[in-house]
Amino acid sequence: MKKVLKQIVGIDVAQDELVVCLSGLYIVSSTSGDLATDLYAHKTFPNSKKGFSSLISWVNKNTDKQVNVRYVMEATGVYHEKLAYFLDDKNLAVSIVLPNKISNFARTLDTKTVTDKTASEAIALFGIQGNLKSWKSPSPIYKKLRQLTRERDQIVQERSRVSNQLHAEKAEVEPNPSSIKRMTTRLKLLKKMTLEVESELVAMIKTDADVAKKNRRICTIPGIGLITAVTILAETDGFALIRSKKQLTSYAGLDVREKQSGTSVKGKPRISKRGNRHLRKVLYMPSLTAAR
């Protein structure tokens, strides 16, 4: 009889659904000690609390109760967060893996098509073959900081759009005074909202000594100011998933990808843009400053 050594739930997380694959690592023969991996069950669940409960019930029915089960997923924007927090609250083993690690691993597999199902299988196999660390819910302050920094970014983007519209309207042959008045009012409101969010960020940083210390240290890097520093902390949960500068670069999608083959194929190096777009956005200009 096969002896179960390891059980992994690979989850490909999307906005509305979770595509799940169960995998196990077994000792096939007690005499030879040969090992085998099996992908033995697939199912899709809604990305909601009801779906999370159904997922756990399904996993419990299809796994060996004597062996711990680990839930593995990618850090996909914000869509994975509710599930991760839910599983951690249930004291279940959770691992969150940076997307570039899964994509690099998937390239080594003999997979001709890429679907949500094959993605969940790749995640499950990655969990089987790797020695993953458990993820724990970060301090609530990082979640609040992330909400505020993203809100500020949206306000700044809208402010830029309104400013451009106002400039275009004023450049018209016959500008509409009422349109100019409304856009000017909107612009003032957006500037006020930006200052309010920034004040709230500064006040929140002061409430946590560890966050304040990390923020000050990051601000000592040339080209990085308060907003950039607090965004970096918010998007990495205080560097909870980051173990090296290479990981941070990959997580932000600023790692360089090259395509070369012999003397005939030589593609232009580009950043991968696979990762956290909020982090990539705030690191772009400081990266150029550092390069100069």
Image (cartoon, rainbow, N blue to C red):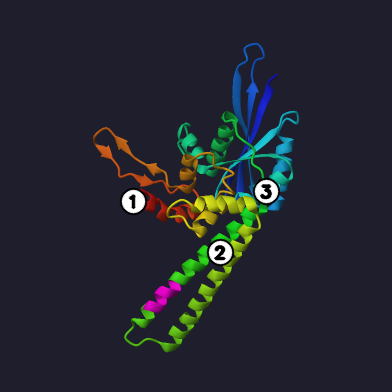
Q: Nearer the viewer, mark 1 or mark 2?
A: 1
- Where disc 3 sits, the SS reads helix
Q: Nearer the viewer, mark 3 or mark 1?
A: 1
Range covered by the magenta-colored residues: 161-167
Residue 153: give x, y in percent of width and height: 51, 63
Residue 270: give x, y in percent of width and height: 36, 46
Q: In the rendering, which numbered label is found on residue 151?
A: 2
Q: In the rendering, which numbered label is found on residue 191?
A: none
Residue 155: give x, y in percent of width and height: 52, 68
Q: Would you name the residue on which mark 1 appears?
A: 292
Q: Main secondary structure of the magenta part?
A: helix
Q: Earlier in the sequence, mark 2 or mark 3?
A: 3
**Location of residue 207 with respect to 102 vertically, above or below:** below
Q: Would you name the residue on which mark 3 appears?
A: 85
- Where disc 2 sits, the SS reads helix
- Identify the residue at image location x=42%, y=74%: 163
Furthest residue toward left: 263
